[in-house]
Amino acid sequence: MPLALRHSPPAVLAAFLSAVGVVLAGIVALTPVEVGPISLQMVHHIGLMNVAAPLLAVALTPALASLAFPPLSLWLFGGAQMALLWTNHAPPVARAISQQPGLQLGATLALAAVAFLFWSAVLSASRERRWGAIAGLLVTGKLACLLGGLLIFATRDLYGLPGFAFAFCTAGPSTLEDQQLAGLLMITACPLSYVTAAVVLAAAALEDAAAPVRHG
């Protein structure tokens, strides 16, 4: 592990490890398969929410150090992140924007922006608010996994999409297998991202709590 990361705050390490885990899992999972429009859209969303957003927040940690996020901001950003994720994957919305590149790009960028704010709030959480950040990560992960489970266990193709007009979503048409792959990707990314970050933060919080006992 690089020296800079070893001496970084636990939240920075948590965000970094969660992003790396998602990238490695994505390489393994996607190499042997052909993605369709729904799973390709899910790849974009996971890449933005669980890789780009935490890594950008890590890169901007020095600048974020001077910001004081209100205590409820993490829950606000986490809720907005999940609301946008679910909205983007709601079949009526997906069908409505599938042939509108501008709308799809706008929805994707909005999701990326609120994901960055969520991870920034996680990184800025003080020691006293660390357990709140852990709870926010776990609740966010649960809601994301629920979406993945719904896509996996649906008995039919909920979307019926010919494809997406946006240049990075040209695969199509959608199928039940495509939809199930999208769900599997999400339900894999959840524990590798939010849960990994929560575990790292929880370990740091327990170590802080044990420190007075060791030195007492």
Image (cartoon, rainbow, N blue to C red):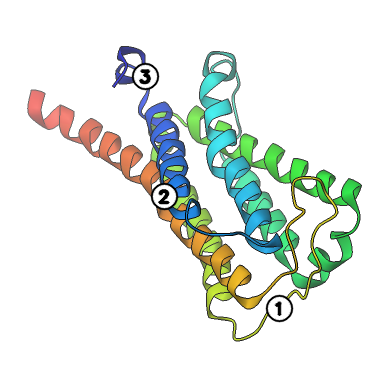
Whether residues under marks 3 and 2 lie with C-beta atoms below 8 angstroms apart, the answer is no
Residue 158: mark in rendering: 1
Q: Position of residue 38 (x, y in %)?
A: 68, 63
Mark-to-mark CA distance, 2 and 1: 27 Å
Q: Is residue 33 above or below residue 177?
A: above
Q: Nearer the viewer, mark 2 or mark 1?
A: 2
Which of pointers 3 and 1 lies earlier in the amino acid sequence?
3
Residue 169: mark in rendering: none
* Vertical order, 1 against 100 (above or below): above
Q: Is residue 144 left or right of residue 13?
A: right
Q: How would you rate the neighbour count of disc 1 (Cα within 10 Å): few for under 14, some for 14-19, many for 20 or more?
A: some
Residue drawn where x is 59% and y is 86% of the image: 155
Between disc 3 and disc 2, the foreground one is: 2
Give the answer, above or below, for where 123 lies relative to 18: above
According to the picture, the residue beneath numbered tag 3 turns out to be 8
Residue type, numbered disc 1: Leu
Query: Foreground residue, 149 or 62?
Result: 149
Whether residue 132 is visible: no
Q: Secondary structure at mark 1?
A: loop
Q: Which residue is mark 2?
A: 28
Dot 3: few (<14), some (14–19), or many (≥20) neighbours within 10 Å? few
Q: Point out the image quarter for the N terminus.
A: top left
| Mark 3 or mark 1, whichever is nearer to me | 1
SS of the residue at dot 3? loop
Report which quarter residue 127 is drawn in. top left
Q: CA distance from mark 3 to mark 2?
A: 29 Å
Mark 3 and mark 1: span between their CA atoms? 44 Å
Looking at the image, is mark 3 or mark 2 earlier in the sequence?
Answer: 3
The answer to whether marks 3 and 1 mark residues whose Cβ atoms lie closer than 8 Å is no
Is residue 201 something that shows in the picture? Answer: yes
- Expressed as whole percent of the image width and height from the top left, the position of residue 177 reads 58, 73
